[in-house]
Amino acid sequence: MSDPVRLGDVLAGMATPGGGGIPAQPGAGGTTCNRCGARADWHRTIRDKWILIELGEWPVGAVPPGKRWRVAGEGTAVNLGRAQPSDTCRICHFDVCPSQPAPVGSPALLAQWQKNAWG
């Protein structure tokens, strides 16, 4: 039996840079979300899609399974699923963009959502 699919993961996989309010210019370096103004970095996933990753790292225990990302040395973003590495992880901007409803069930994601909302 597979894990449930989360809306944020689906949206991140379907996002096409430059469309629907998604910032253009994926690639190296940071960008600003057209919806909320927060800074984040575009990274290509292992499935050859683009995802907007928040700046900074979080203790892995503070981020729910399925919301944990690792950015490899060459810049590829990998969703860790239920894996629980012992150090840190990154989070997807789409999970904490204040243009979306506030995340529930994770104080860490809610804190980042509030930080993005208040600039």
Image (cartoon, rainbow, N blue to C red):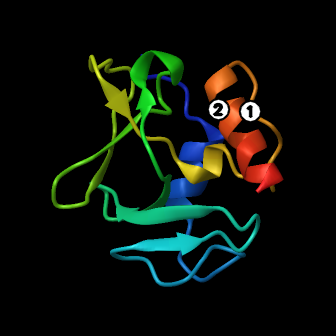
N-terminal of the two: label 2 or label 1? 1
Residue 25 shows which numbered tag? Answer: none
The residue tagged 1 is: 103
Image: 37 above or below 110? below
Q: Where is the N terminus found, in terms of image quarters? A: top left
**Residue at 59% over, 36% down:** 6
**Residue at 56% over, 66% down:** 15
Residue 34, position in %: x, y? 71, 74
Residue 107, position in %: x, y? 68, 21
Q: Amino acid at mark 2?
A: Leu
Give the SS element for disc 1. Answer: loop
Q: Left or right: where does residue 6 sit relative to residue 89?
A: right
Q: Where is the C terminus found, in terms of image quarters? A: bottom right
Q: Are marks 2 and 1 in contact (CB under 8 Å)?
A: yes
Give the SS element for disc 2. Answer: helix
Image: 88 above or below 61? below
Q: Amino acid at mark 1?
A: Pro
Q: Left or right: where does residue 89 sit relative to residue 54?
A: left
Quadrant assignment, res 38: bottom right
Image: 65 above or below 101? above
The residue tagged 2 is: 109
